[in-house]
Amino acid sequence: MTYFYLTLLIFSFLFGICIGSFLNVCIYRIPNKIKVYDGYSFCPACHNRLKAYDLIPIISYLVLNRKCRYCGCKISPVYPIVELSAGLLFAFTFYLYGLYLNTLIVWVLISVLIVASFMDINSLEIPDGVSLWIAVLGVISFFIPGLLWWEHILGIFAASLPLFIILLLTKGGAMGMGDIKFMAAAGLLLGYKLILLSLFSSAIFGSIIGIFLIAFKKKGRKDPIPFVPMLSLGILFSLFFGNSIINWYISLL
Ligand SMILES: [Zn+2]
């Protein structure tokens, strides 16, 4: 690994943390219909304006001992969690793809998935804009050399169609149209193989997380489940490791 590459890797991590800080603003502001770019940052509890030194990602959270400087209310751990996961995922993406268009596409995808996941956790709803963003990334990805376009057209239906049939059979049930549009857009970006793997891995992640939440009594058996975080985990897992897993599986046959 050259120094140049290592510098870029560290830059990716720090850049991801800063983007994570912006994503926190999106997670809070978009559902509350506050303009994302407008105005200063404020404490959601006391609405006091926050100074620049209180807005340093992760560090301010630790220095302020997890409390607002003005009203002393607890700062949600979601803020540093979002910042740190964006940083780590950005760095890992750069590590995998290097200085290519793929890195940029996956960075935007990670950002959209993080915002969508926390919106879904907070309100069990995601705006259509989320799927639109992912679909646009899917169209841009057609510029990646060597991409088999028909695999990606097929991807639109590979996961979304089975989900749609389940939705019809369960008459609404737990899933919503939002989840289906989300998987159709992700299918365009990932192609049919990886989106099917995403669906399977989401089901596994979902079961594991579900068992933990019920075991620790965070949720009851009948509570509504936000699907987008599980689907997002599945999508990123499949994107990062899917091709190796599929090749390994084929080698077994
Ligand atoms: Zn406050």
Image (cartoon, rainbow, N blue to C red):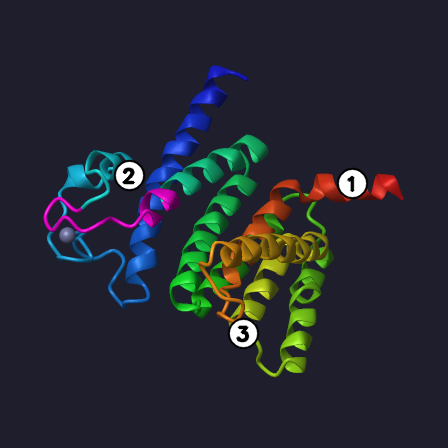
Does mark 3 have its CB less than 8 Å from ligand 1? no
Sort mark 3 into few (<14), some (14-19) or many (20+) by Cα contacts within 10 Å: some
Q: Element at badge 2?
A: loop
**Amino acid at circle 2:** Pro
Residue 57 got which mark? 2
Total marks shown come to 3
**Amino acid at circle 3:** Gly
Compared with 68, 189 (above or below) is below
* N-term mark: 3 or 1: 3
Residue 137 visible: no
Q: Nearer the viewer, mark 3 or mark 1?
A: 3
Q: Element at badge 1?
A: helix
Distance in Å between CA atoms under marks 3 and 1? 33 Å
Q: Which residues are magenta?
A: 68-82
**Amino acid at circle 1:** Asn
Quarter holding residue 177: bottom right
Q: Is residue 249 left or right of residue 140?
A: right
Report the magenta stretch's main SS. loop
Distance in Å between CA atoms under marks 2 and 3? 34 Å
What residue is disc 3 on? 176
State the residue lying farthest toward the bottom: 171
* N-term mark: 2 or 1: 2
Marks 2/3 in contact by CB < 8 Å: the verdict is no
Residue 190 screen position, x and y as percent = 63, 53
Residue drawn at point x = 22 percent, y = 49 percent: 74
What residue is disc 1 on? 247
